[in-house]
Image (cartoon, helix red, strand yellow):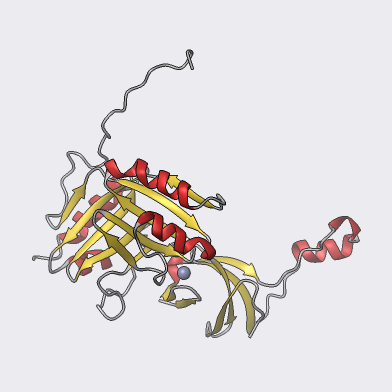
Amino acid sequence: MLLIPCPYCGNRPEIEFAYGGEAHVVRAADPRKEDDAAWTEFLYFRKNPRGDHAERWRHAFGCGRFFNVKRNTYTDHIEASYRIGETLP
Amino acid sequence: MDNLAETTSLSRLFALSGQAGDRRCRPVTGGARFSLRVKQASLGAAGEALGLDLTGPINRAVSSGQRTALRLGPDEWLLLLAEADAASVAASLAQRLTDGLYSLADISHRQTGIALEGAAVTDLLNGGCPLDFDLAAFPVGMATRTIFFKAEIVLWRQDTARFHMEVWRSFAPYVWSLLANVGREYAD
Ligand SMILES: [Zn+2]
């Protein structure tokens, strides 16, 4: 079983977590000023890399917190986990 | 207020009454429970109001007399109290936390308790919960929200071979029967 390091609880089994998609996708402060292309990009387009990926997870069956993880999507190796608001290490 | 019907408080229907279970599992009836959310800045005052030190680490229990607080998250506690104590807790928190920046929700009837005791309880729990129950990883006094098969539970290790489990009452018969199923594999 994959162990995911929660920044609050430490290493916990994957089954306790819920995946939250790519991290650091910033919503425009005023979406009305976005053109269709930029808004479409924000809504629908993600990097989906084969390799290092910054992504959100929530410790749903644990502390309940959202946090970010830097995971390699090819090897599943997790390099770092960090709290919401912190920058990618 | 004249148009409100007079109601009397009924005793709680117990979620597990009459259901056979594993002999190491015992239903815990009654008790009051609160979900408490407090910001870091108010921890001292909230702790004084409750008579419990809330500044301790996450996933740990602190007890004083009949009151227990399980720190389930950075700003979330599950309070376990005697039923007679419930009203005074709400009042003393309201008195101390005058800025009102906290939440206290009465969840007494949302969940029910199961006590597990015996040499094989960690095997029993591992039947449906993936946590490592080695004493180094899950010491006495640790308490956390986790999962048992598909149900959310809260587990509190009260002693090496004694746990208290909190389950939402509608999930309780499910958890109870699965504990009995897993228990068939363990003799003692
Ligand atoms: Zn956590």
Question: Closer to the camera, B163 or B100?
Answer: B100
Q: How many numbered dots are placed on residues in this image?
A: 0
Residue at 59% across, 81% down = A70
Residue at 57% across, 71% down = A67
Question: x, y (%) of residue A16?
Answer: 44, 66
Q: Could you tell me which quadrant the C terminus of chain B lies in?
A: bottom left
Residue found farthest to the left: B188
Classify residue A33 by image quadrant: bottom right
**Is B76 placed left or right of A43 in the picture?**
left
Determine whether B182 is above or below A14 in the image.
Answer: above
Question: Closer to the camera, A17 or B53?
Answer: B53
Determine if residue B127 is in view. no
Determine if residue B124 is in view. yes
Question: x, y (%) of residue B5?
Answer: 42, 16
Determine whether B115 is above or below B84 in the image.
Answer: below
Classify residue A11 by image quadrant: bottom left
Question: x, y (%) of residue B36?
Answer: 44, 53
Determine whether A18 is above or below A85 in the image.
Answer: above
Residue at 28% across, 61% down = B63
